[in-house]
Image: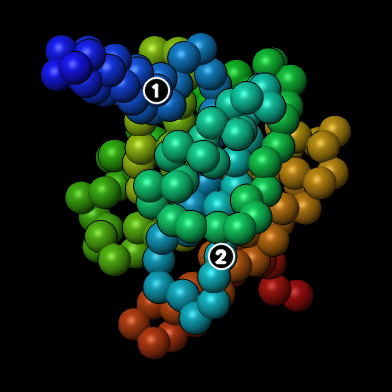
Amino acid sequence: MRRTTIVILVILLSSAITLVTEAHKPMNLNVLGIEYIGPQDHPIGPIVISDSKEGTEWFSRVVLKRTIAWEYTPEFVVSASVMKSLISEAEVHRDIAKHDLSDTSEINQIVRITVVTPQGQSKFLINQKLAYSMLEKFKGLCNDNQPLQSEISLFQSEILSFKEYGTTIVNPFKIST
């Protein structure tokens, strides 16, 4: 009886460990997560983009669940070529952010970008101006996906309302007439 109980516990424990390990393993996914992490007076939801439905679902369930709780997370599936371009663009902006980080206060790093590829996962923070610029590039790469472009535009307008030290930052890309 005691031996049977021990065997059952070992089997259950090993099954649980396997399930947890598999849930956190990105497998062969390509996913891009965009999250606003700055000060806010209302919730600003994340955007999840992948080249597969499995990728968006995995990211929302495993990665975002650990950082934030959203009832609805916009999830977008794009072609593999668009996904590759988006990840490349994010990596360019990651390199710019690394270079500029020494000149920028950490409080101004208001957007977190998470890139998941079969090679691994990386996260980086960017400021408002760099985030806006990166999101503009994303919209250009997703010109055939109107719902994604709309969601990115909404996210851009939200980050433009970010207040730094009590003053609203104006749109640095708006041309006055």
Residue found at x 48% / y 57%: 69
Can you name the residue that lies furthest to the front here? Answer: 1
The answer to which of marks 2 and 1 sits earlier in the sequence is: 1
- Image quadrant where residue 22 sits: top left
Q: Is residue 44 left or right of residue 120?
A: right
Residue 26 location in percent, x, y?
A: 45, 21
Label 1, on which residue? Answer: 19
Q: CA distance from mark 2 to mark 1?
A: 31 Å
Is 142 placed above or below 170 here?
A: above
Residue found at x 38% / y 47%: 66
- Label 1 sits on a secondary structure element that is helix
Amino acid carrying mark 1 in the image: Leu
Q: Nearer the viewer, residue 134 or 16?
A: 16
Residue found at x 56% / y 52%: 46
Q: Residues within 10 Å of mark 2 (few under 14, many from 20)?
A: some
Label 2, on which residue? Answer: 44
Can you name the residue that lies furthest to the left here? Answer: 2
Q: Is residue 169 left or right of residue 11?
A: right
Amino acid carrying mark 2 in the image: Ile
Q: Is residue 49 left or right of residue 37?
A: right
Q: Nearer the viewer, residue 44 or 136?
A: 44
